[in-house]
């Protein structure tokens, strides 16, 4: 067996084994590509009009006090934006986000409840195939392994797709879609063309997915940048990847958040959004995420922790304070979704994810056609009494 044949059978085996899960990851990736924009569009009616000559924004404590109780759950975070028309967003863990008028503190209702539930279910499917809490580790292991298989496909694919002898007609057959094809010829053409055009951005998406799936890959990012990996179990999460806090039970948020919020505003004068995470126990420092961008640029984010009693800064972590390993790791999170490139990056991520779904479909179709041809030829060999040489499988 030649090296090219060995590579082909490795490519085929990886695609057939992991194809269905890769298809799920690709489709859910397309659906999640514009999550922030879709939620903002659904919430477009919940706007606050700055009062002419009236008072400015109410205190953070006043906004929290105006939010009606949600059973025994208390707010886990509150977000304000510099846009004067944007409402305040009060989060109750991963489950609910309530909106409040940014000037009167009046509740405006829940933020896109159906849309958020849809994206949450899609994200769970993307991360761990929608498995319940008890089986999420197994689901994550499967998606991680299939992501590795996808990496094998992307590395071996271009070697198989590019023609052995380079000429313009041969290159054109793998660089451009051909009309009038059907069946196997169409699938082969689509598989080659989409593979060639999508391989570079897909490599970025898949490699970043591998880093987020495996501690050894995460540590490798730190080592190749010449920095020491964080201690096991103490890996800093990339910005935007932090686990959403669970619902607080049996506690109300403590008062006197206003001086702490003012400290956060003064820390970054040009902020566009500030998120304050609220500890249900009321202990420890109060943590802020301050963003000077639209939420997709880790270099425009900073972390601030303020002592709740004294108002002193306990920890200040702008992006510039990160070591090189943590900087790369932070960028990988947003390269995975395309958000690092803004709307254009998200569009590229969505398009190549859709292309990956077609790659899976055409690859499985070609594999099935190969299997059927092999079975047909095997039957013909049996009928002719074992004259295999007349029916060589190519």
Image (cartoon, rainbow, N blue to C red):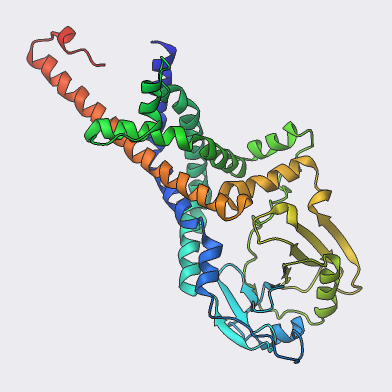
In the image, residue 354 sits, relative to residue 222, either above or below, namely below
Residue 184 placement: quadrant: top left
Residue 303 location (% of width, % of height): 78, 59
- Left or right of residue 56, residue 96 in this image: left
Q: Nearer the viewer, residue 168 or 252?
A: 168
Percent x, y of residue 259: 85, 78
Front-lying residue, 85 or 208: 85
The answer to whether any part of residue 130 appears in the image is: no
Q: Is residue 207 above or below residue 302?
A: above
Task: State the image quarter where residue 196 is shown.
Answer: top left
At x 26%, y 30%, the residue is 185
Q: What residue lies at 51% left-to-right and 55% top-to-bottom?
A: 33
Write the residue at 15% across / 9% down: 390
| Residue 229, percent from left and from top | 75, 39
Q: How many marks?
A: 0
Horizontal arrangement in the rendering, residue 136 relative to residue 365 (left or right) = right
Q: Quadrant of residue 46?
A: bottom right
Q: Is residue 111 left or right of residue 172?
A: right
Q: Is residue 75 visible?
A: yes
User: Which quarter of the rendering shows the C terminus?
Assistant: top left
Relative to 368, say whether 50 is above or below: below
Q: Quadrant of the N terminus?
A: top left
x 20%, y 28%: residue: 372
Q: Position of residue 343 (x, y in %)?
A: 57, 55
């Amino acid at each position: 067996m030649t090296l090219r044949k060995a590579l082909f059978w490795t490519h085929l085996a990886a695609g057939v084994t992991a194809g269905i899960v890769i298809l799920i990851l690709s489709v859910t990736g397309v659906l999640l590509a514009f999550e922030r924009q879709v939620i903002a569009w659904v919430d477009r009616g919940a706007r606050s009009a700055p009062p002419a000559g009236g008072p400015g924004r109410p205190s953070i404590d006043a906004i929290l006090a105006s939010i009606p109780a949600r059973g025994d759950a208390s707010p886990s975070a509150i977000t304000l934006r510099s846009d004067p028309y944007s409402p305040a967003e009060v989060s109750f863990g991963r489950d609910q986000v309530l909106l409040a008028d940014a000037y009167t503190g009046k509740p405006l209702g829940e933020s896109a409840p159906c849309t958020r539930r849809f994206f949450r279910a899609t994200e769970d499917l993307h991360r761990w195939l929608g498995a319940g809490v008890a089986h999420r580790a197994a689901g994550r292991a499967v998606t991680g392994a299939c992501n590795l298989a996808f990496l094998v496909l992307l590395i071996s694919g271009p070697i198989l797709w590019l023609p052995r002898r380079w000429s313009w007609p041969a290159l054109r057959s793998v660089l451009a879609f051909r009309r009038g094809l059907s069946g196997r010829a169409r699938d082969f053409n689509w598989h080659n063309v989409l593979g060639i055009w999508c391989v570079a951005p897909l490599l970025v998406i898949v490699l970043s997915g591998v880093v987020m799936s495996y501690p050894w890959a995460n540590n490798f990012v730190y080592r190749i940048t010449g920095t020491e990996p964080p201690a096991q179990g103490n890996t800093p999460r990339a910005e935007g990847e932090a686990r959403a806090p669970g619902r607080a039970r049996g506690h109300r948020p403590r008062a006197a958040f206003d001086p702490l919020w003012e400290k956060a505003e003064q820390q970054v004068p040009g902020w566009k959004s500030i998120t304050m995470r609220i500890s249900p126990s009321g202990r420890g420092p109060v943590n802020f995420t301050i963003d000077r961008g639209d939420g997709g640029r880790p270099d425009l984010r900073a972390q601030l922790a303020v002592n709740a009693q004294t108002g002193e800064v306990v920890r200040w972590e702008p992006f510039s304070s990160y070591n090189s390993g943590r900087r790369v790791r932070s960028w990988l999170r947003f390269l995975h979704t395309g958000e690092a490139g803004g709307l254009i990056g998200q569009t590229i991520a969505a398009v190549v994810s859709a292309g990956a779904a077609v790659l899976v479909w055409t690859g499985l179709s070609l594999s099935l056609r190969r299997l059927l041809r092999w079975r047909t030829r095997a039957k013909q060999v049996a009928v002719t009494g074992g004259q295999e040489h007349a029916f060589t499988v190519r």
